[in-house]
Amino acid sequence: MKLVTTWFGTFIVDDEGQILEKTLFPQDEKEIASRLELIDKGEVLVEEEELADGQELEVGEKRLELLGTYSNIPLPDIKPEDFGFSMIMLNKAMLSRGREKVKASISPDEQIVQAIRAIDDLTKITNLMSERLHEWHELNFPELTRLVNESQYIELIAEYGDRENILASGKVSIGDSLGADISETDAEAMKLLAHNLKATIQRRDDMEKYITVRMDEIARNTAYLAGPLVGARLISLTGGLDRLSKLPSSTIQLLGAEKALFKHLKDNAKPPKHGVIFQHPIIHRAPPWQRGKIARAFAGKINIAVKMDRYGTDFIGKELEEQLNKKVEDIKKKHPKPKPRKKGGKHKK
């Protein structure tokens, strides 16, 4: 006797292909899809176990070796329509399975990739809106730019609009202005632009807070060591945590510096020493001649953090940070000053 499973049920047949026993699957595309998925994973179905029930059987699939003797048996001609099933149902089951595969393929770090790209988009928008606001408002109050910082600049225009109202508020003071008078309608339009700019900046800030929370959930070590935004940007540049975890530290060190690297290879320009990790204070606050060495050490520790986030569960961020800080201190002691300039050239960094 042989145990045979099709997409619509499992059967015990004799040597002539006659059906002796059978268990049909529910006539529901999701139920069929779930069984097809288990078969693909190499698992034994409950229906197969119950039908076999200790009988001496031949099986034609390796995954069924626990239920019988494996042999390359020919499949009998069992037609689905004989049991109330149709190919339409199989098509629906395959579509259902495909949808579930798509859902399963979207990993949590894909959300991080999209969020970082959203921040990049919002940053471009805020830069364009800010530039436009400055150009427009300077027709009326060109001196305001040097009197306050960017945040105050946007706030004052959003609240008061034109030069007359801003000066009347007492928030800033100036003698004669070189700006031209504008109408109330013009002032209201500027206020509206400033309000929209404020709202866009707030959305960007909200997105950064979201990334901070999500990075702590899916890449805690990387977020702790590199900072949530730098860590998220590394994930975004590689397309996911899995791919990032497979890169050597030398590649991680230069992620985001592809243009500079290409220029080095093409035009023999100076090679880059760091990519987006330069945004981390431990690198960009260091003296120029130390940055390359610190970036190399930093990338090495990130490499370990990423692998732990991808394949492990332990939190080792503090331990890695201590090791990195010690390494940075060693670099500072060994290289307190830039190397002496070579004759006819600049000192090495």
Image (cartoon, rainbow, N blue to C red):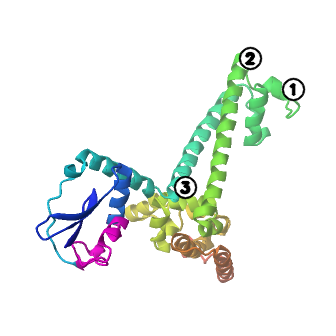
Say what amino acid the circle numbered 1 marks: Ala
Q: CA distance from mark 2 to mark 3?
A: 44 Å
Q: CA distance from mark 2 to mark 1?
A: 15 Å
Secondary structure state at the residue bearing disc 1 = helix
Which residues fall within the magenta stretch? 40-69
Can you tell which of label 2 and label 3 is closer to the viewer? 3
Q: Is residue 66 magenta?
A: yes
Where is residue 55, by image quadrant? bottom left
Say what amino acid the circle numbered 2 marks: Glu
Secondary structure state at the residue bearing disc 2 = helix
Q: Which residue is mark 1?
A: 168
Secondary structure state at the residue bearing disc 3 = helix
Q: How many marks?
A: 3
Q: Is residue 265 above or below residue 142?
A: below
For marks 3 and 1, the one nearer the N-term is 3
For marks 2 and 1, the one nearer the N-term is 1
Q: Which residue is mark 2?
A: 184
Where is residue 16, by image quadrant? bottom left
* Camera-nearest residue between 249 and 212: 212
Q: Is residue 230 magenta?
A: no
Task: Please give the name of the residue rendered at 66% of the width and 35% of the height, measured from the top-left corner.
Answer: 197
In the picture, the disc for residue 112 is 3
Are the residues tagged 3 and 1 within 8 Å (C-beta)?
Answer: no
